[in-house]
Image (cartoon, rainbow, N blue to C red):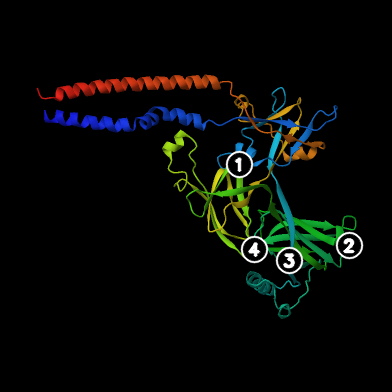
Amino acid sequence: MLLSIKFANTMPNLFAIFASNWAKSLYMIFLLPVVAWANEKPMAYQANIELPTVPVETEAFLVHFSSLSPALLANICQTDATPSTEHLRIVDRDGRVMPMALRPVIQTSKQQQPVQWVQLQTNDPNMVEKLRKQFSVQASNLDNLKIEMQNLPNIPLTNANPSITWWLKNPLDKIRLPTQLQVSFDNITYEKPLELQVFASDDLENWQQIEKKIWTKLNQPKNNTLTINIKSTEYSRFWQIVANQPIQINVAKVEEATEIPNYFLTRVNFEPISGQSQQWQLQLPQPILVSGMDFLVPEHQIWQVKLIEPVIKTSMLDKITTANSYDSPNDKLLAQTQVSLTTPRVLWQPTISQNLQLIGQMNLNDVPVTLLSPVYELYFLAQGNAPYQLVIRDTRLNNIPNIILTDTHIQQIQQSVDGQLDKLEPIEDPNQQLNQQKQWLLWISLLGILMILSMLAYHLYRQTAKSAKPS
């Protein structure tokens, strides 16, 4: 009897707790999977392609888009924020998929650095070893080679075909992009063919041949310059050049290619966050692909800035499963650094962002910045019937693979035109109305089940309370 009374006294409390949280409980238990499915379903888009007038006799031509917008790139990114053609298609009026290529736009600049060398005119093994040790030590510790060559005896080579050897120090710590080694020579007579052999080594002992050239009067290079293309995977600390004639090196240098990033610029303003000191927010109309920003820092000022991509509650699902809009543990730190007039740029790994938060010690109301987005170009081969469309995540094309347009194809096609993309528009899902009807039916069914369970629970509570009363 005592147990029944305690249970009866506890039941109202349980029902009060359930009643106070019934909406949230209902949502979490029954409707959460439905809403989560609805929120995670990606949108499909399309954009018309405008082309200039093309001669009628042209059967196929190349169309080039020099820079895709950051918003479009955000819609075709993979999970690692890398743009991809996986969900991107270009179709003609009959729905046929056109060959295409998506490429990052990268500019390169070339810089030249001098190469220092020493000349070997001896075949004495002891002298060669002594020179090798001095060269290795000096090349590792000093910017300039200062080997006391006069301390080494100059013993001419005595073999039938006298040769001459040079050791060259690579001025680069590593080769990031394909690089050229250029060596020009003097005193070439071409009375007989000139043979040049080039070797590479990291220790001046183990050598691997990387090039062999034979020059004659008929094929002598311009300015008597030997040019060797070195790939980024072929880095070596030293080179050795062996010639079969007593010629002289005039100039030796390496020409290094460096990448210069291209950015799509978007000017925006951070606005102050109400009730938050020294914090600003940026809310874009749509997600874009962004990898940095430039600040407008006045002269003689230095700002300490912290950039965060906050978790914003955009749906009922977010409001239940996340904390506050700002200062959430799920917020992503993009950068934390100092900026000034001479160093205004902040960079991070490309990310898809629509909302950004700025924290800093600036005496400003609004903070103007320029967002930096990577630049991608798009090519497609117009070999169908105009007009053409760009489509993203169109379910009707999921089973149609892309036709890849290679760099070789692009170079071979002579005629190309610049295309223009219209605004991205959502693609209406023909099954959308049916899906909405199914969702409403599911919700009504779940509500009906909940009402039945509530009536049964209430009936059980009445029975339990009645039996618990003392007779």
Q: Quadrant of the C terminus?
A: top left
The mark closer to the camera, 2 or 3, is: 3
The image position of residue 310, as x and y in percent, is 50, 46
- The local crowd at label 4, few if under 14, some if 14 to 19, many if 20 or more residues have their Cα within 10 Å, is few
Residue tagged 3: 115
Crowding at mark 1 (Cα within 10 Å: few <14, some 14-19, many 20+): many
Q: CA distance from mark 3 to mark 4?
A: 40 Å
Callout 1 amino acid: Ile
CB-based contact (under 8 Å), mark 1 and mark 2: no
- From the viewer's perspective, is the residue at label 4 or at label 1 nearer? 4
Q: Which image quadrant is residue 397 in?
A: top right
Q: Are marks 2 and 3 in contact (CB under 8 Å)?
A: no
Q: Nearer the viewer, mark 4 or mark 2?
A: 4
Label at residue 288: 1
* Element at label 1: strand
Question: Can you give x and y, in whole percent of width and height, for residue 445 in the image?
Answer: 40, 19
What whole-number distance in Å separates the C-alpha atoms at marks 4 and 2? 62 Å
For the N terminus, give its image quadrant. top left
Q: Nearer the viewer, mark 1 or mark 3?
A: 1
Image-based side of 265 in relation to 414, left or right:
left
Q: Which residue of the protein is positioned furthest toward the left in this rendering?
A: 471
Please tell me the numbered disc located at residue 190.
Answer: 2
Rendered image: mark on residue 299: 4
Give the camera-side residue of 38 and 462: 462
